[in-house]
């Protein structure tokens, strides 16, 4: 089983939290990841964070700001608020194999968090990548 470096915490606007388990198995559908539970919670995410032993990387879906270990920043143009910001979260996997492609030599994961919104028919998004 692959060990994830970062686990996520979703903070909802009602003050509750959802924490990803190390096994990353949905309580709703065991064939899916924990993120499926966030998407199907019926709640609005206020802040989404990736956490490991030493780092906390967050996106605030109320104001669009990112926070990495206490340093708050905006990753692009500041948009007029209020705007309905939708969460972006995914993991990109890179697998390296030997020449015969029979043995995996490495498996790296990049984590991507951010938001997107539509204003006057135009789509905007901002993401950060965490290795």
Image: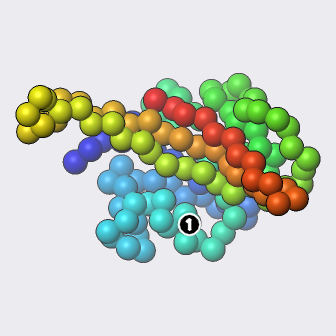
Q: Which one is nearer the viewer's eye here, 84 or 1?
A: 84
Secondary element under disc 1, as helix, strand or loop, is helix
Where on the picture, by quarter, is residue 110? top left
Where on the picture, by quarter, is residue 79? top right
Q: In this view, does 21 lie above or below 6?
A: below
Q: Tell me where residue 72 appears, x and y as whole percent.
A: 74, 29
Residue at image coords 8%, 34% = 100
Image-based side of 14 in relation to 48, left or right: right
Q: How many labels does the image show?
A: 1
Image-based side of 128 in relation to 63, left or right: left
Residue at image coords 48%, 59% = 35
Q: How is the image coloured?
A: rainbow
Q: Is residue 40 above or below residue 95?
A: below
Q: Is residue 79 above or below residue 41?
A: above
Q: Tell me where residue 114 appears, x and y as whole percent.
A: 64, 44
Q: Tell me where residue 75 appears, x and y as whole percent.
A: 73, 32
Residue at image coords 42%, 42% = 92
Where on the picture, by quarter, is residue 13? bottom right
Q: Which one is nearer the viewer's eye here, 64 or 27?
A: 64
- Residue receiving disc 1: 39
Q: Which one is nearer the viewer's eye here, 108 or 15?
A: 108
Q: Tell me where residue 15 appears, x and y as whole percent.
A: 70, 59
Residue at image coords 63%, 40% = 127
Q: In this view, does 110 lie above or below 27?
A: above
- Judge the density around disc 1: few (<14), some (14-19), many (≥20) Cα neighbours within 10 Å: few
Decide if residue 15 is in sight here.
no
Decide if residue 12 is in sight here.
yes
Image-based side of 108 in relation to 125, left or right: left
């Amino acid at each position: 089983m692959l060990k994830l470096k970062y686990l996520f915490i979703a903070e909802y606007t009602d003050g509750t939290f959802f924490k990803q388990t190390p096994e990353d198995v949905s309580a709703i559908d065991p064939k899916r990841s924990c993120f499926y539970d966030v998407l199907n919670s019926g709640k609005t995410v206020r802040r989404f964070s990736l956490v490991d032993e030493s780092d906390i990387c967050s996106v605030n879906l109320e104001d669009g700001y990112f926070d990495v270990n206490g340093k708050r920043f905006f990753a692009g143009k500041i948009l007029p608020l209020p705007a309905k910001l939708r969460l972006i979260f995914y993991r990109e996997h890179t697998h390296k194999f030997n020449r015969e492609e029979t043995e995996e030599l490495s498996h790296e994961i990049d984590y991507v968090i951010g938001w997107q919104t539509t204003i006057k028919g135009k789509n905007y998004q901002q993401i950060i990548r965490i290795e």
